[in-house]
Image: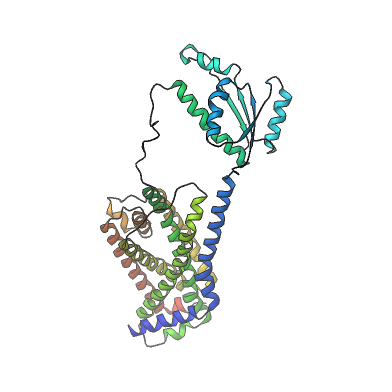
Amino acid sequence: MKNILTIIKKEFARFFGDKRLVLTTLILPGLLIFTIYTFMGSAIFNGTQVDENYVTTIYTINAPASFQEKIQPLLTESQFQAEYKAIDASDKEGINRIKQEIQNQNIDLCIEFSPDFDQKVAEYDVSLGITAPYIRMYYNSVKSESFAAYSLLNTMFTNYEGTLTNKFDINMQPDIQFDLATNEDLTATILGMLLPFLILMFLFSGCMAVAPESIAGEKERGTIATLLVTPMKRSELAMGKLMSLSVIAVLCAISSFIGTIISLPNLMKGMGELEITASYQFIDYIWLLLIIISTVLILIGLISVISAYAKSVKEATTLVTPLMIVVMVIGLFAMLSKSTEVSSNYLIYLIPIYNSIKVMGNIFSFQMAVVPVLITIVSNVVYASAFVFFLTKMFNSEKVMFSK
């Protein structure tokens, strides 16, 4: 145990003694993620907002009485400000000019109704083969004001159509809440699908940042030979390396995770009005921490074995790249395969990486089950022990450790 602690202290001294390494692996990832996600959320949010004092320019063709009597009052009630201008349907040149102005983002919307729209609506009967009246709206989705006006008018016309043709109402009572999913449940579902994959990528990035330099780097510099000739077991050297690297990798992941959590409200603001309200118990964080630690042990073990095989840090990084692709594919597959639901097939919790994604998704979505969590943690520790065994064998092989 004393030798293991010595190796751990040596690795900590190497890492924390290098201020540039601490800055680039612990501080910058979380700071960059926070900055990027915050700017992304603000950009998306600002790009979809319309100035409350903005007056929308709308041209109408064959506007019926129903539009003026029923639609425009509803728009006014919704505090939608618009300037309506009528244009004759026979003025083809004028209509083409308006469409061009919409394309140039100078005009917001042009609404064209069927001639005698209200009469055709009253007479329309699909069983008689009568042609249905139409409404055509020309807009520019690139211009936020134009797209906002189109979305609002489209909703108004759809609701108006329902009042003309429906025989019964479905969920039309505004004072009744029909969607019984709570905001917390909706938030937890989103977090349960998004965060596990992000955490996995952060963990892998942290492991990749420290493991190749610790093992392949020492081989490249020749300092690994000094460690190998000391009177310690190669298994102790392997365990000391993996444990110290795991702690550093977890710290790297925590930095990125904190940056993500802090910036997530700003990012979500740009994607809708859903407020992040999910709250977790202390035991949830404990289970999550154990899952993260066990996952890091696997990732560090894999990368360390590859690094021990490589002759240099550059070669180790190159060899780790295919592993990163595999890990990303597994993470995406788990994220897209209902990762927030607890599976009754406990065998899937024996699959490394995939099991961690599944369990983290369960935790974030309040569907955690103790048995899958325990299976995942125990299996991950077993796999990590196997990597310690393989790494020990590699340290015992002079052919592997001193190859040039």
Q: Up-down: is 48 above or below 265? A: above
Residue at far right of view: 93
Q: What residue lies at 45% left-to-right and 63% top-to-bottom?
A: 257
Residue at far top of view: 128
State how the image is colored: rainbow
Q: Up-down: is 262 above or below 74? A: below
Q: Quadrant of the N terminus?
A: bottom left
Q: What residue lies at 52% left-to-right and 61% top-to-bottom?
A: 34
Q: Position of residue 138 (x, y in %)?
A: 62, 31
* Camera-side residue of 303 and 121: 121
Residue 157 horizontal side relative to residue 342, left or right: right
* Camera-side residue of 366 and 68: 68
Q: What residue lies at 40% left-to-right and 87% top-to-bottom?
A: 230
* One can see residue 253 in this view: yes
Residue at far left of view: 371
Q: What residue lies at 70% left-to-right and 33% top-to-bottom?
A: 100
* Camera-side residue of 177 and 196: 177
* One can see residue 312 in this view: no
Q: Position of residue 92 (x, y in %)?
A: 71, 23
Q: Position of residue 299 (x, y in %)?
A: 41, 66
Q: Position of residue 7 (x, y in %)?
A: 40, 82
Label tally: 0
Residue at far bottom of view: 231
